[in-house]
Amino acid sequence: MQLVGRLQIQSKEKIAEFLNQEHVGRIATIDSNGYPQIIPMNFVFFNNAIYMHSHTKGEKLENIKANPKSGFEVDRELEFLPSYFSSPTDASMADTLYISVVIKGESVFVQDPREKALALNAMMQKYQPEGQYEPLRPEMDVLNYVAVIKVLPDEINGKYKIGQHMKPNSRLDLAQKIFHRNTPTAEQTLKVMGFEVTDDGLKMVDEPIW
């Protein structure tokens, strides 16, 4: 239980920052047969809610109409840690550094054209920050041809594992192994862990607390 507590993201600001860095989230609804249906979606976390756009017809929309209770999940695998980092033979020692956020709440369909336009413009700002598009306005007819789903969170829970549960020397040793393995994600992982690559090796420049 102590380890689980240390993996929890405590900062609401960090959760919001993470959500709006990620491009794919997964909404879970319950279908007509009682099974969970999980669909990857583009989204934006805006005004303390998740917004997504969709076609005006589809199974997930029917699911929401029948049962608005929904789940929403976003995750990022930072780095796979091969088993040989910890043991030369024990495959069970493989691990992963990650960040994840899980939301439970109710989904509603946004009907107000002003809120629709605000949500869709927030999505455009997230996915196309360079601009070069005409912002949507409430009076635009195009808003009638798109559904906007809003997930109102009842619970938001985040977890992260970047070595914060390890002793300083063990954490540095792990960072060194990640550095020498040199995967395409290694540099970004080390940055999230709070390390900087210098001429003298790795240096802890920040103690990230989420």
Image: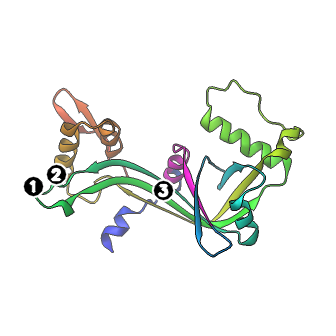
Q: Are marks 2 and 1 in contact (CB under 8 Å)?
A: no
Find the distance from the CA under tag 3 to the CA under tag 2: 30 Å
Q: Is residue 37 depicted above or below 124 in this figure?
A: below
Element marked by disc 1 = loop
Q: Is residue 120 shown left or right of residue 35?
A: right
Asked whether residue 31 appears in the rendered view, the answer is yes
Q: Position of residue 68 (x, y in %)?
A: 71, 69
Position of the N terminus by quadrant:
bottom left
Q: Which residue carries the number 2 mark?
A: 85
Report the magenta residues as a range.
Answer: 14-29
Query: Residue 190: percent from the left, percent from the top?
Result: 30, 41
Colour scheme shown: rainbow
Using residue 192 as the reference point, say whether residue 204 is left or right of it: left
Quarter holding the C terminus is bottom left
Give the amino acid at mark 1: Pro
> In whole angstroms, how far apart are the C-alphas of marks 3 and 1?
37 Å
The answer for how far apart the CA atoms under marks 2 and 1 are is 8 Å
Mark 3 Cα-neighbour bin, 10 Å: few <14, some 14–19, many ≥20:
few
For the point 66% across and 41% down, the residue is 123
Which one is in front, 200 or 160? 160
Residue position marked by numbered label 3 in the rendering: 11
Query: Which mark identifies residue 100?
Result: none
Q: Circle 1 sits on which residue? A: 88
Q: Indicate yes or no whether the magenta region holds residue 105.
A: no
Q: Nearer the viewer, mark 2 or mark 1?
A: 1
Dot placed on the residue nearer the N-terminal end, 3 or 1? 3
The kind of residue tagged 3 is Ser
Residue at horizontal 10 percent and vertical 58 percent from the top: 89
Q: Residues within 10 Å of mark 2 (few under 14, many from 20)?
A: some
Q: Amino acid at mark 2?
A: Phe
- Location of residue 62 in the rendering, given as x and y in whole percent from the top left corner: 74, 64
Q: Position of residue 196 (x, y in %)?
A: 28, 35
